[in-house]
Image: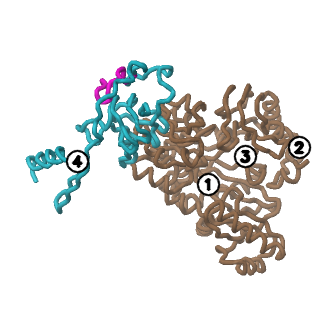
Chain colours: A cyan, B brown
């Protein structure tokens, strides 16, 4: 299988409903996994709510050295759900260096949707959403170390 | 020397290690549980990483998070302090697997000497006296036949044991069956291993331990000994250095400790514990493969920083001094101040320290992570400070410690300070008639 074949395969997968695909021969193993379907950003609530999501640059676009803007605590509505790091490790926003982020502010997620990866001791641990709702804040930059209990995302339940 | 190290502990020992590292120009990463967010080592560290919720099993014993914290911060070495993972061979091994230096002995050393039965065997091989003792006991009959041979009193101990759990003194055959079953169950509950062995029980022994240091290549020196006979339920409360023994015994006991450490090519700081009977016979009881709570008593009489030496040896720089360079000067006493109520059977007294004033003046050292406004979490041990007094003689050290404890103010929680003052005032203590049953026999109301 060469690059052209892979491209054809990916195109075929993109046109289908398949979200995960593995192909193994004696020489290689190919794993293709598609991120959660991005949902059109719901901006309906924006009028009623302060708009912290808009104030937050997507983590991978943040300039090096600058921390993502974090809205003041008073701006965070109390019903939003915080997703915290269950382990210490390195935060990865996407499944691979050049792949798009699992989620960005404004994305809709369902329980079980992968939000990020935390690498600990060379093991990739997928962190999943437990609530359905809209991701409002992504608070950690790609490849940043995270500690236990650190808030990674804020989700507005919906 | 290391550029950056991780301190895998909490409380006063985390602070002690941080201080040693900082003086050597080493950057410090302190890990902490959510209950310790506002503790002094966390506030003073160059970097601090939360590794879990309050229960130690999910934080300070969480190997994955600890190692992950070391790796993401770029630490080169891990200092385990005492307790938690300090004597966990598997943890030491995992550190090395991830190219982190474990500041302590090799995993294999921890493993062998940490097993009580194996340790006795190693001592025997090294020609170090041990109390007459049994092999691991298969059953009650094996215990009976050992008792017939050696005679009472005897002590049952857990093979995997420590800290007094699984230990039972037996005075007669009538006692044996009940105590055997009790000790077995206690050992099973505490260590997941019910195996017991038996030893001759010494009445009124002194607990004397020798501080040793090895480079891992067979070079071992000692930093003389401490007397830790003042214990309550096998927990040390007050330690002295040097002990009150004659020079002949001192020489024999320190030589024995060095022989054992040399036999296993020990690396780093360690302590060989002995029981000494009234006739001056001494018997090896166990080796602790870590820095100990009471190490400052030794530091005060030798004017030497043992924790910094741990870093040098771990960094492969070898021992920085030879035996001739180690000299004893004066006498040091350390008291362990715990947040416990001595008037109510030492029950824990967690809470917020509303005010604190530590003693000062000549010859006083205070190692404490506590400050005014600090809340003592209920999740960990109750040690809040070690106060150490040094003076040219034992008598002067006692006077200095009394003076220091009277200056000490700790408000908001009950502490053992008043109890320590009573010990210092006790006539038996003052003339050095101190054995491991001192508190039970001399201090009971």
* Chain designation of label 1: B
Which residue is the site of mark 2? B426
Asked if the residues shown at circle 1 and circle 4 are in contact, with their CB atoms under 8 angstroms apart, the answer is no
> How far apart, in angstroms, are the residues tagged by discs 1 and 3?
18 Å
Q: Say few, some or many: other residues with alpha carbon within 10 Å of mark 4 (under 14 / 14 to 19 / 20 or more).
A: few
Disc 1 secondary structure class:
strand
Residue B243 position, x and y percent, is: 75, 49
Q: Quadrant of the N terminus of chain A?
A: bottom left
Please report contact status of discs 2 and 4: CB closer than 8 Å, yes or no. no
Residue wearing tag 3: B242
Which mark is first along the chain, 3 or 1? Answer: 3
Tell me which segment is drawn in magenta: A52-64
Contact, CB < 8 Å: mark 2 with mark 3? no
Classify B261 as above or below B100: below
Q: How far separated are the C-alphas under marks 3 and 4?
A: 78 Å
> For this rendering, which residue is in front, B259 or B164?
B164
Residue displayed at 57% across by 44% down: B81
Residue A17 circle label: 4
Q: Nearer the viewer, residue A146 or B418?
A: A146
Find disc 1 in the rendering and name its residue.
Answer: B288
Chain ID at mark 4: A
Task: Identify the mark nearer the N-term, 2 or 3.
Answer: 3
- For residue A131, side relative to residue B445 (left or right): left
Task: Give the letter of the chain under mark 3.
Answer: B
The reply to whether residue A153 is visible in this rendering is: yes
> Is B375 a magenta residue?
no
Between marks 1 and 3 in the image, the one whose residue lies nearer the viewer: 1
Query: As rendered, which of A93 and B22 lies closer to the eye?
Result: A93
Q: Residue at x 54, y 52 (%)?
A: B214
């Amino acid at each position: 299988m060469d690059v052209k074949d892979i491209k054809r395969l990916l195109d075929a997968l993109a046109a289908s409903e398949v979200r995960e695909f593995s192909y193994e021969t004696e020489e290689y193993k190919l794993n293709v996994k598609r991120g959660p379907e991005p949902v059109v950003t719901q901006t309906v609530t924006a009028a009623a709510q302060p708009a912290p999501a808009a104030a937050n640059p997507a983590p991978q676009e943040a300039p090096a050295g600058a921390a993502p803007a974090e809205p003041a605590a008073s701006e965070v509505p109390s019903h939003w759900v915080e997703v915290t790091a269950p382990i210490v490790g390195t935060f990865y926003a996407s499944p691979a260096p050049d792949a798009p982020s699992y989620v960005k502010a404004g994305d809709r997620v369902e329980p079980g949707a992968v939000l990020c990866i935390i690498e600990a001791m060379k093991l990739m641990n997928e962190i999943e959403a437990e609530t359905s709702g809209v991701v409002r804040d992504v608070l950690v930059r790609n490849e940043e170390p995270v500690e236990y209990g650190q808030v990674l995302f804020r989700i507005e339940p919906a | 020397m290391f550029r950056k190290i991780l301190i895998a502990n909490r409380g006063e020992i985390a602070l002690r290690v941080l201080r040693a590292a900082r003086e050597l120009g080493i950057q410090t990463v302190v890990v902490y549980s959510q209950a310790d967010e506002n503790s002094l080592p966390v506030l003073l560290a160059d970097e601090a990483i939360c590794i879990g919720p309050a229960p130690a099993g999910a934080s300070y014993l969480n190997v994955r998070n600890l190692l992950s914290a070391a790796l993401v911060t770029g630490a080169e070495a891990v200092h385990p302090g005492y307790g938690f993972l300090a004597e966990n061979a598997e943890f030491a091994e995992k550190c090395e697997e991830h190219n982190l230096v474990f500041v302590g002995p090799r995993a294999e050393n921890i493993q062998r000497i940490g097993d009580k039965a194996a340790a006795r065997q190693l001592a025997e091989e090294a020609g170090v006296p041990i109390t007459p003792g049994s092999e691991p006991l298969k059953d009650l009959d094996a215990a009976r036949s050992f008792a017939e041979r050696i005679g009472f009193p005897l002590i049952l101990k857990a093979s995997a044991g420590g800290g007094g759990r699984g230990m039972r003194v037996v005075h007669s055959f009538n006692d044996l069956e009940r105590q055997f079953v009790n000790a077995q169950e206690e050992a099973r509950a505490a260590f997941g291993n019910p195996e017991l062995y038996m030893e001759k029980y010494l009445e009124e022994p002194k607990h004397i331990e020798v501080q040793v240091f090895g480079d891992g290549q067979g070079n071992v020196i000692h930093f003389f000994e401490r007397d830790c006979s003042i214990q309550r339920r096998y927990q040390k409360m007050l330690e002295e250095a040097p002990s009150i023994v004659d020079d002949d015994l001192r020489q024999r006991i320190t030589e024995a400790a060095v022989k054992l450490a040399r036999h296993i090519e020990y690396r780093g700081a360690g302590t060989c514990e002995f029981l000494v009977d009234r006739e001056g016979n001494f018997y090896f009881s166990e080796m602790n493969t870590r820095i100990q709570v009471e190490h400052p008593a030794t530091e005060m009489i030798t004017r030497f920083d043992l924790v910094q030496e741990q870093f040098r040896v771990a960094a492969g720089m070898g021992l920085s001094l030879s035996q001739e360079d180690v000299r004893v000067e004066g006498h040091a006493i350390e008291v362990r101040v715990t947040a416990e109520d001595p008037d109510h059977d030492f029950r824990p007294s967690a809470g917020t320290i509303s005010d604190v004033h530590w003693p000062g003046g000549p010859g006083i050292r205070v190692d404490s992570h506590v400050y005014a406004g600090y809340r003592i979490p209920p999740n960990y041990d109750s040690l809040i400070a070690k106060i150490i007094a040094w003076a040219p003689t034992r008598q002067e050290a006692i006077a200095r410690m009394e003076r220091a404890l009277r200056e000490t103010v700790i408000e908001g929680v009950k502490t053992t300070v008043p109890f320590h003052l009573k010990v210092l005032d006790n006539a038996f203590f003052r003339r050095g008639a101190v054995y491991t049953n001192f508190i039970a026999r001399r201090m009971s109301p």
